[in-house]
Image: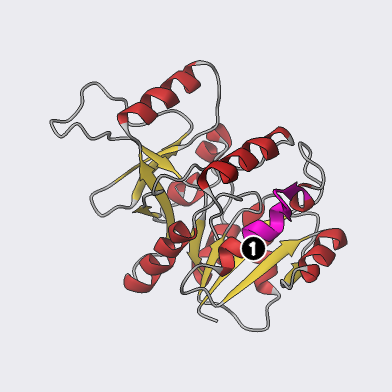
Amino acid sequence: MDTIVVIPARYGSSRFPGKPLAPIAGRSLLERVWKIATAVPGVDGVVVATDDTRVAEHVTSFGGRFVMTSESCRNGSERVWEAVSQLAQRPKNIINLQGDAVLMPPWVIGALVQELSSDPSVVIATPATRLTTEQYTSMSKMKSSGVVSGTTVTFANNRDALYFSKTIIPFVRSWSESGLSPIYQHIGVYAYRYESLKQYIDLPVGRLEQVEQLEQLRALEHGVPIRVVEVSLNGRTMWSVDNPEDVTRVEEIISLEGELV
């Protein structure tokens, strides 16, 4: 297999126990994420990485494939690596798609697959979308009120990331003549070469990673480049499921915008 998607799915979420099995408009959260992954062109296989037999049994019920991983994994990246390490055939490229990314457009993941296939120099890739001025204003108000969700990214001319932050970067003192926003919001899905994921897992936790609580900063701190792929959401709304209350919001979005797949 050249490219696989691995979906880390823990049953024992502290904020939402049993989250992968939570029903959303007639289908479980995990089945929805799995269907998104299987709809991505260029993906040769989809695997759910879990530490709970209830999740494994559910994956089997909708025809998916799972790999059992240990409860000691500290984050999704470690769970993805542990799952990949157990596969009989080593994939060249690995997409880490979080198990709560229930509204992730398939074409966003497809852009990462295309980036890896078109540029052999890319070792890690992740998407970002340019904010409109209205979206920038909305994020600024949200951040001012103390909300920490929403990560922004800056990148060099070759599109390799310079920094990721929970604050809005860059600081905007003046707008360009084009009127386009210079702010890019990061979308939390990652594409790795097999070797780069192994390298990442072996790296020590970075000081900036600890401060911002953003695990992708570990790669930058150790000089591992991350290619930023600009994507459009084509009018779709992104929303992850962190708490039970998010289920209602996601169902409202699906009702308004329709199914992704």
Name the residue at the top extreme.
145
Query: Is residue 219 on the magenta stretch?
Result: no
Q: Position of residue 99 (x, y in %)?
A: 66, 54
Up/down of 136 relative to 187, above or below: above
Up/down of 187 relative to 87, above or below: above
Q: Secondary structure at mark 1?
A: helix
Q: Position of residue 206 (x, y in %)?
A: 54, 43
Residue that mark 1 sits on: 34
In-front residue for pair 140/173: 140
Magenta-drawn segment? 22-34
The residue at the point 41 percent across, 48 percent down is 233
Q: Position of residue 191 (x, y in %)?
A: 49, 62
Quadrant for the N terminus in the image: bottom right
Within 10 Å of disc 1 (Cα), the crowding (few <14, some 14-19, many 20+) is: many
Asked if residue 219 lies left or right of residue 79, the reply is left
Quadrant in which residue 198 is drawn = bottom right
Name the residue at the left extreme.
177
In-front residue for pair 93/223: 93
In-front residue for pair 254/168: 254
Query: Is residue 32 on the magenta stretch?
Result: yes
The residue at the point 33 percent across, 52 percent down is 160
The residue at the point 48 percent across, 16 percent down is 144
Up/down of 170 relative to 140, above or below: below
Asked if residue 7 lies left or right of residue 44, the reply is right
Report the amino acid beneath label 1.
Answer: Trp
The mark tally for this picture is 1
Q: Position of residue 44 (x, y in %)?
A: 55, 78
